[in-house]
Amino acid sequence: MCALTTLHHPGAVVERISGRHHLLWAGLLLIFLGGCEPTGQNAYPSGPITFIVPSNPGSSTDTASRTLTAVLQDELGQPVNVSNRTGGGGIAGHLALRRAPPDGYTLGAITVEITMMHWTGLTSLEYTNYTPLALVTTNPGAITVRSDAPWQTVNELLAAIKETPGAIMASGSSHGGIWDLCRIEFLEAAGLPESGMPWIPSQGAASALKKLLAGDVNVVTAALTETNALRKTGQVRTLAVMAEQRLPMAPDVQTLKELGIDYVSDGDWMVVAAPEHLPETRAQLLRIALRRAFTRQDFKESMQTAGYQLRYLTGSAVEVFLEDQDNTNGLLMDRAGLTLQ
């Protein structure tokens, strides 16, 4: 059975719905308040939902998506199945979500790449091609070296870069990827040119870490969520994180700001989105479900243990976030000579 507590404000009614089918009742309430959803057996959602992830299984976005969908399906009362669509540095997955019917049965993760790829001419896709529902996590970068590297601190690494410009190589993503941009901004914040620590492109953090362990590169700038397994086994050492505050999964690792380097990055964030033109009644129902999933203790504990920074934005706030990211990344890529002229 489902219990509905009647309150004076309609929005409050939605928040007080409980029981297995609380979101079905929420959907019916939204219809009553002026939506145009079908009722009865066709009420949304009435079947499984596909969640598109534009990266490989095991990536940070994939891990965050699977953690979220595991609780989201409880809130929706229907299976939410992850589908990895890889290729083109994120283009394939973002394009698949863009082309899906805007009916609420295909959702997905849009990532920082959607605010970067169009600046280089790789695709015409932009964040405006989607219905953003909620930002749920950011994934700040970290500066990682091999455990036997001669640098024990970031300042020692910077001193070495100054002494032998170009000799210390870094990797973490493709050329012009988010971790390449983080490298550039980190060096600029430290008063060094980006040429001081050249970039060796890789197919993501996992590939970069293989290069690091093999001695092909000296530094990896990538999310701590992607390097922490090797850190725990003592194969690599993390010198600093690019977060506003120390991360719960690594409280012993200092931030760059603590070390006197004024640089913070949201890194590889994840926004849950639907195709453009999703009906507002369904968008609102999904926002309610995402908010409930986000506030669940099991979700919070899983994400924080894995090293993600939880941050929830929805409505106009997530639209402003995407616009700011697009403008910032476009300017940075232009400074680095990575955009179309």
Image: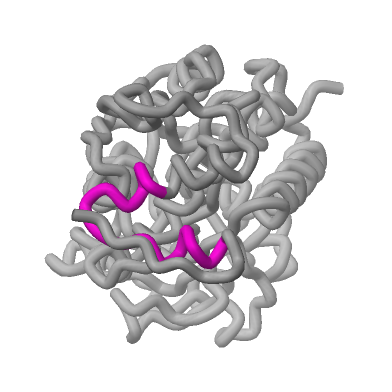
Asked if residue 231 shows in the view, the reply is: yes
Residue 14 lies in magenta, yes or no? yes
Dominant SS type (magenta): helix
Residue at horizontal 41%, vertical 73%?
239
Residue at horizontal 46%, vertical 16%?
96
Looking at the picture, how far across and down is residue 250, in whole percent?
31, 77
User: Relative to the observer, which residue lies in front, 240 or 7?
Assistant: 7
Colour mapping used in the image: one colour
User: Relative to the observer, which residue lies in front, 133 or 151?
Assistant: 133
Q: In this rendering, would 282 be left or right of 302?
A: right
Looking at the picture, how far across and down is residue 294, in whole percent?
39, 61
Residue range (magenta): 11-25
* Location of residue 269 with respect to 224 vertically, above or below: above
Residue at horizontal 35%, vertical 21%?
85
Q: In this rendering, would 130 be left or right of 192?
A: left
User: Relative to the observer, which residue lies in front, 332 or 154?
Assistant: 332
Residue with the most extreme right position: 341
Looking at the picture, how far across and down is residue 57, in whole percent?
24, 34
Q: Quadrant of the C terminus?
A: top right
Residue at horizontal 35%, vertical 22%?
42
* Location of residue 16 with respect to 48 vertically, above or below: below
Q: In this rendering, would 2 be left or right of 24?
A: left
Residue with the most extreme left position: 233
Q: Quadrant of the N terminus?
A: bottom left
Q: In this rendering, would 126 be left or right of 154?
A: right
Looking at the picture, how far across and down is residue 100, in whole percent?
48, 15
Across the whole image, how many numbered discs are drawn on residues?
0
Asked if residue 155 shows in the view, the reply is: no
* Location of residue 143 with respect to 268 vertically, above or below: below
